[in-house]
Amino acid sequence: MSELTAGALVLYKIRPARIVEVSDKISIELEGGKAKRVRDKDVTLLHPGPLSGLHQLTPQSGEVAENWELLEGAETDIKELSELVFGDYTPAMAWATWQLVAEGLYFEGKPHAIRPRPAASVESEIAARAQRAVEAEAWNGFIQRLQAGAVLEEDRKTLSEVEALALEQRKKSRILQALAVQETPVNAHRLLLKAGYWPANENPYPRRMGIDESIPGHTVPPLAEEARLDLTHLPAFAIDDEDNQDPDDAVSLDGERIWVHVADVAALVAPDSEMDQDARARGANLYLPDRVIPMLPPAVTDRLGLGLQQRSPALSIAFTLSEQGEVENIAIHPSWLKVERISYSEADQRLREAPFAQLLSKSQRYRQRRKAAGAASIQLPEVKLKVHDGKVEIHPLPRLESREMITDLMLMAGEGIADYCQSHQIAIPFATQAPPEERTEPEDMAGMYAYRRFFKPTQVKTQPEPHAGLGLAAYTRATSPLRRYSDLLTHQQLRAHLRGEGVLDIHAVSERIAQSEMGSMTNRKTERVSNNHWRLIYLRDNPEWQGEAVIVAKEGERAAVLLPSLGMESRVRIKGEAGLNDRVRLKPREIDLAGLSCYFRVV
């Protein structure tokens, strides 16, 4: 072929170019008028010209398939192929010829050595391209339906990749890329709601957090025959919320001796059994507004929940309380009980009668001791969220003396067991909390909100350390073994000790703590975000809602507020002279369910 000269058509990378000048380097003009200087080896001659401008490279029509068959088994060049297919060899026809080669269907090779592709390859390629065309048409139709919010049932399979992104099971989504939407779980969530792939109330957080949502179905062994202290003569009261389904603690009073009875879960759940390992991985019950996912098979609660059977097996902790509010004379026994179940509100009505009046007096004495030791009294609004048939109900939890009394009685048991285990060198999980940098006794909501931020989260350790928030030198959580694995672990250690069997050493206990705390932390986060999710559902479904908010922190016009009726914290812009603890009335301005946020305005 001819030498490179001005006006020639050349191939630069994969695009056409026109030679403008040839010197030590070659000046070329690219599409769009852009000029560039290149080396001769950077370009390939397609036609010697003359070509006055790339605009002359117009589309051409010719007989491609017929000449492909004619050339079968032969080799040609761009000039001959152009003449065969298009009837001549002009710059426009040369470019059209090269496009046929670059397309790779009928021909392949280089400008000076072009070969017809084998018939089998051509047929296969034609079929593949037809299939891709069908898929492209289907894809474009899918994207159009998605943008219009009118997806079909058949689109659900395609949308599964978006669901995987929304659940943080993958990081990329071709669909979000096609929509020019940033690939984030929140944006994926929004799209799934818009498309109707997820129902309007879908709570994705358990799956996003990797929660095992199955109900444990392990076979529960029968309760073994063993000596138990018969306490059925002693009135025992399981006091909890009205809708509680897993009563695992009860209280009694026998003269000056206080009894805290706890469901004897370790009697059925042996260390390292399948039930134990599953519960350890889960860490605790998961309490969601619409359901509960237990860490143990429901049959365990049915058999051991206090007051659910005519006679309940328990692990009973007995102790006395000194005049200074100290837990003394601790004894622990497997027992039999007859338990009466009552609600906090019922118990509140009976606080002036025995044994509740005496238990209340002792709990108040104990509370005073803890307060003197620096216990924090932070009373921020709490609510109970429940979902029934898709409808969200939010009920503020009133401050009841009976609730505070039971809290203190359970703390007494936890402190007593911690002391007992230290005395008998039994390794157990201790609940600890570092003290704040400074101690205060806030009385208003803003003060309590600020003080709470000084406390670090409770940690579970194998060494007894103070729990600053409770004002206790050593404490273990041991009164909820149906709901929390660390409590069950303590019970397993106590039962082994009481039977004279070997207890787990501190290293084995530490390993179990580490395993269960992973599940517990995931559960707590899941509960927190799920509660926020259902609060937003409530506000969405009640568009006329307005409520009172208390300002608990303020910086300029930006304020942190608590909404007591929702048990919710938010940020809002407040103009004027409003200060801490002032109350303002708010109304939702915008609810972002996928973003888990609500923007309020002052009304």
Image (cartoon, rainbow, N blue to C red):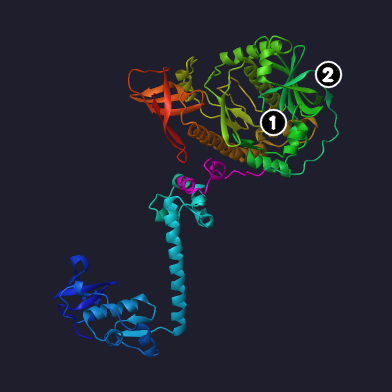
Residue under the point 40% across and 53% down: 179
The quarter of the picture where the C terminus appears is top left
> Which residue, given by chain and number where applicable, does mark 1 sit on?
245
Residue under the point 17% across and 73% down: 53
Q: Position of residue 352 (x, y in %)?
A: 69, 9
Q: Which stretch is magenta? A: 190-214
Q: Position of residue 252 (x, y in %)?
A: 75, 18
**Label 2 sits on what residue type?**
His
Place residue 280 in its image quadrant: top right
Dot 1: element: loop
Task: Judge the density around disc 1: few (<14), some (14-19), many (≥20) Cα neighbours within 10 Å.
Answer: few
Residue under the point 71% across and 16% down: 328
Q: CA distance from mark 2 to mark 1?
A: 25 Å
> Which residue, given by chain and number where applicable, does mark 2 sit on?
233
The quarter of the picture where the N terminus appears is bottom left
Dot 2: element: loop
- Say whether disc 2 or disc 1 marks the residue closer to the N-terminus: 2
Can residue 330 be seen? Answer: no
For marks 2 and 1, give the one nearer the viewer. 1
**Label 1 sits on what residue type?**
Gln
In this orientation, which residue lies closer to the viewer: 159 or 441?
Answer: 159
